[in-house]
């Protein structure tokens, strides 16, 4: 493997890690929002937002770990994302999840557009990135829909 290919694979991993961290923020924000909601709304949040976010987070972590292992690169532990102050409203938390999911989607979209997954990646990493984007792509619409129900 050439030095350039090794650097490009590390860059791919770094971008994937950044996106994974963004998804972790979304998961944590949704977890905190869940705790503040009534049972019916919490169940809706879990089904439409938390489920896809949690799956995206797991898939992103797995994609990162498998690609790193396949190419002899260092893996990474992803810790839960601290959100800071605890006096955030449900709306604040949903907006935070929406922004983080959007950030992850942008990072992964830019990664796909860069052609790194094609040039130095493999089919498994391309599939993983695509699956994560599909899951994360569900979050903004579902978050906006849930946000519309507040204040009625």
Image: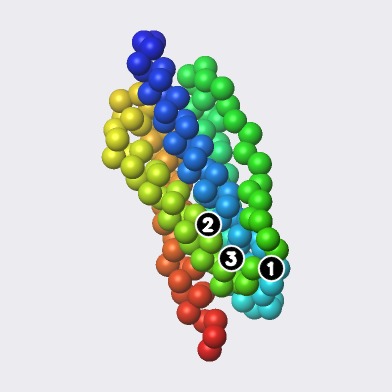
Seen from the viewer's position, the closer of residues 12 and 82 is 82
Mark 1 closeness class: few <14, some 14–19, many ≥20 residues within 10 Å: few
Residue that label 2 marks: 52
Q: Which labelled disc corresponds to residue 93?
A: 3
Residue 136: image x %, image y %? 46, 54
Residue 71 vs 117, above or below: the answer is: above
Secondary structure of residue under mark 1: loop
Measure the alpha-carbon separation of dots 2 and 1. 25 Å
Residue 152 vs 120, above or below: the answer is: below
Ranked by sequence position, the earlier of labels 2 and 3 is 2
Q: Which quadrant of the view contains residue 90? A: bottom right
Name the quarter where the N terminus is drawn.
top left
Seen from the viewer's position, the closer of residues 67 and 11 is 11
Q: Residue at x 51, y 66 (%)?
A: 95
Q: Which labelled disc corresponds to residue 141?
A: none
Measure the alpha-carbon separation of dots 2 and 3. 16 Å
Q: Residue at x 36, y 10 (%)?
A: 2
Please say if the residues under marks 3 and 1 sit with CB atoms less than 8 Å apart: no
Q: Residue at x 46, y 37 (%)?
A: 16
Residue that label 1 marks: 87
Residue 149: image x %, image y %? 52, 81
Residue 61: image x %, image y %? 56, 38
Q: Is residue 64 left or right of residue 102?
A: right
């Amino acid at each position: 493997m050439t030095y350039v290919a090794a650097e490009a694979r590390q860059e791919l991993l770094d971008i994937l890690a950044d996106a994974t961290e963004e998804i972790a923020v979304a998961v944590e924000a949704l977890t905190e929002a869940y705790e503040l909601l009534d049972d019916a709304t919490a169940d809706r949040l879990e089904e439409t937002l938390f489920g896809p976010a949690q799956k995206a987070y797991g898939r992103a972590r797995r994609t990162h770990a498998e690609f790193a292992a396949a190419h002899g690169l260092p893996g990474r532990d992803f810790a839960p994302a601290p959100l800071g102050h605890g006096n955030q409203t449900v709306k604040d938390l949903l907006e935070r999840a929406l922004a983080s999911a959007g950030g992850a989607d942008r990072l992964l979209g830019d990664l796909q557009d860069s052609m790194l997954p094609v040039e130095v990646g493999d089919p498994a990493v391309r599939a993983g990135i695509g699956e994560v984007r599909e899951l994360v792509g569900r979050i903004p619409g579902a978050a906006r829909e849930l946000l519309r129900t507040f204040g009625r």
